Image: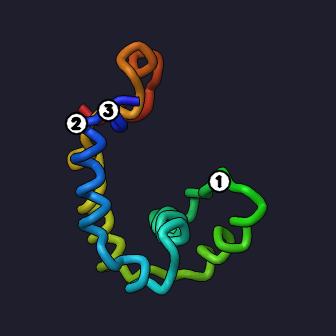
């Protein structure tokens, strides 16, 4: 997972720091923010989070969070295919995958 190699991981953590107080601004947790952002993107996107029973209630709470369009735009600008360092997959797997190719 190249995004988690030492040099990429350090850069990607800086992206998270840029979010700062975004979850508290939106009145939610980090997990709810991620799910609410996906729900705000388009009606045909249905997030399916991996979870454990103790997180189900937290995750379903994301459906009640409405993110303001300026906040969605700010989130889009912070973490995207141009700002994340490293590929999601290693080279061999990337060649077999038809997603995550933004070139």
Residue linked to disc 3: 5
First reached walking from the N terminus: tag 3 or tag 1:
3
Above/below status of 17 relative to 99: below
Q: Quadrant of residue 6?
A: top left
Q: Are marks 3 and 2 in contact (CB under 8 Å)?
A: yes
Q: Position of residue 46 (x, y in %)?
A: 61, 57
Horizontal side of residue 54 vs 87, given as left or right: right
- What residue is shown with label 2? 7
Q: Would residue 67 appear left or right of 20 to someone viewing this image?
A: right
| 11 versus 19 height, above or below | above
Circle 2/circle 1 CB separation < 8 Å: no
Q: Secondary structure at mark 1?
A: loop
Name the quarter where the C terminus is drawn: top left
| CA distance separating discs 3 and 1 | 26 Å
**Residue count near mark 2 (Cα–Cα under 10 Å), binned few <14, some 14–19, many ≥20:** few
Q: Position of residue 20 (x, y in %)?
A: 30, 73
- Residue at the location (24% across, 62% down)? 77
Q: For residue 68, which quarter of the picture?
A: bottom left
- Disc number for residue 48: 1
């Amino acid at each position: 997972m190249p995004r988690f190699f030492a040099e990429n991981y350090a850069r990607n953590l800086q992206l998270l720091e840029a979010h700062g107080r975004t979850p508290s601004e939106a009145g939610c947790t980090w997990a709810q923010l991620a799910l609410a952002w996906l729900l705000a993107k388009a009606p045909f996107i249905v997030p399916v989070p991996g979870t454990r029973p103790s997180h189900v209630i937290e995750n379903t709470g994301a459906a009640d969070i409405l993110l303001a369009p300026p906040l969605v735009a700010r989130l889009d600008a912070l973490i995207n295919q141009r700002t994340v360092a490293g590929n999601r997959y290693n080279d061999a797997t990337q060649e077999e995958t038809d997603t995550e190719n933004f070139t």
